[in-house]
Image (cartoon, rainbow, N blue to C red):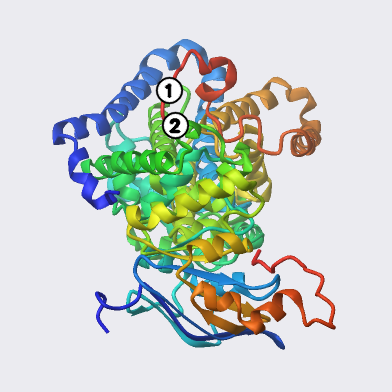
Amino acid sequence: MKTLAERIAAHRPGLLRAIGGSAWPIALGFLFAYLMQTVLAPAVGDFYGKMMLDVGIAIVLGVSLNIVNGYGGQFSIGHAGFMAVGGYVAAAIVFYGSIKLWGSKDIHGGFLGPGELLLVTGCLVGGGFAALAGLVVGLPSLRLRGDYLAIVTLGFGEIVRVLLQQTDDVVMDPRKVEAASPIDLADNLGGALGFFGAPRYLDPKNPFWIWLFVVVVLLVAYRLKTSSRGRQLLAVRENEVAAEAVGVPTTRVKVSAFVLSAFFAGIGGGLYAHELGNSLRPTDLGFQKSIDLVIIVVLGGMGSITGVVVAATALTILPEVFREFSEYRMICYALALVLMMILRPQGLFGLRELWELAPWRKVFRRGGR
Amino acid sequence: MTAATAPALEADRLSIAFGGLKAVAELSLRVPARGLYGLIGPNGAGKTTVFNLLTGVYRPDSGEIRLAGTTVNGLRPNQIARAGLARTFQNIRLFGELNVLDNVRVAAAVRARSGLFRSLLRTPLYLAEEAAIVERSHELLDVLGIAHRAGEQAKSLPYGDQRRLEIARALATEPKVLLLDEPVAGMNTPEKKAMRSLIQSLRERFDVAILLIEHDMGLVMDICEHITVLDHGVTIATGEPAAVQNDPAVIEAYLGVPEGQAAIPDDDAEVT
């Protein structure tokens, strides 16, 4: 039988075709985010607009956590820690950067203006720092099998929270900021009071970047799941011994998934830090937040992208709708988790996507997969 | 020795002990290219431990393992698989939630070069590799006679097909040597017959040497060219089937000494 190497040449697609196939979802994503900005945001008003911002950020965080907890079957309960790393790095870059560049912390420039580009830079660098933290946490703990990752990520989230609480006050005086070097300012993150004052670029009227990153994280999650690298991750989750035996470098696969997941958690944190109405306090991004995200993944389905999107949407909107019962929220979550583990441990959707569920199967007939 | 003349797989005086228990002692074997080599012995003789040593799950306390002339001692299991040693498991280990095709695709992807970034960007190389992986995986399922089940969940397959899927998955890694751990265990006579001709056909078709653990004496004596018999981790006989069959030490290991009592068989130890 012909080996893989002998077959590849016959399957090479034309370059233009490949570029087109690779790029059209991204172009569509831009269009989608642009329509959310120009058509939907003005139409729904501030209350529902804010809710949609929260939904978007919950999707970014839930889908990224799903890469580790869902595809990889590893149990990370420190996702908010990576979110905090990304959020604080992004906030520091945007806040102090604005003062250094333009002399004030206020919003600078309009839609797609220089201020927003600084925001995107901040989010990406924040994601980079979170990814680095992911590498440091993942390398030692993912070598081991079992529940070590849960323990280590739990500890990591708490360490991040405590460290952030020890930082100094935010420097508000523009002249002092101008004088200080970035390294001096790295310690001025607001301490236990939180990093207040970062410009709120993302508001109900201006959700473009949130939806763009939602599209990016969905695209990455989908392409990962349907690629050989992603399938290796699923294989690790299904049977680690067998995965090793067929040549899957299990440690490397797990660590790279963990780093990718942390990267998007950092971006989610950066978006969160610049959303109108949010406070960036260490306690807001603590253990409770991590558990909220784990619940999204577990309810939605361990490995299902659309399942997590549905769960992230529902678990963001429901608490708003039932605001008067908010003190019972954790009881409901706990009950839902217990019931879920008994009745449907693989989550609502399991590994399946929305279009693969039984009633729709005949409508969305997809061969192969 | 050069790769051209070296045996496909060679183990040289392998030993491992778990605590005080010598599980395998001074085991040596040579599987020539396209050879069919049998490893037999009563339950608990250490056969599966040998497989775990060869595939890097355990590290031998002493001895050397060479794959086509290259030493592979101390490599991790995934590196040994890449070097060309594939195996099946006695207690089947499939990727249960994945479908049959995807089980094979995971293994076939080992020979692909595209990393994470190429996969996310869907570059031409990535697309070509994925298409080639799918094509090869379908062909493998076809050869193993389970092509009609490609879309089914692996854990929902009947037992015999699960064994076939394990072999398809192992072959997908493009091995030089295939280790089969009790491939006909629990099968009825027609199934065994089909599996026997399948195993024989694999050597030509995939240019692969096979090392076989099996309890079914008829099968081993029929198809293997060379046999090693283990008992309590010690090699008690090695040679051609006919010679081994009549070896008094082998008869004693299986049937016990005339005035003694046959040991109650217990299940083979297997790594979990």
Label 2: chain letter: A
Of the residues shown, which amino acid type is indicated by label 2? Arg
Q: In the rendered view, would you say A339 is above or below A156? A: above
Q: Position of residue B152 (x, y in %)?
A: 54, 33
Which residue is label 2 attached to? A369
Do the residues at pointers 1 and 2 share their chain? yes
Q: Nearer the viewer, residue B93 or A305?
A: B93
Label 1: chain letter: A
Image quadrant where residue A10 sits: top left
Which residue is label 1 attached to? A366
Q: Residue at x 61, y 53 (%)?
A: B92
Of the residues shown, which amino acid type is indicated by label 1? Arg
Q: Residue at x 46, y 54 (%)?
A: B199
Image quadrant where residue A293 sits: top right
* Mark sitting on residue B140: none
Q: In which quadrant will I find the C terminus of chain B?
A: bottom right
Q: Residues within 10 Å of mark 2 (few under 14, many from 20)?
A: few
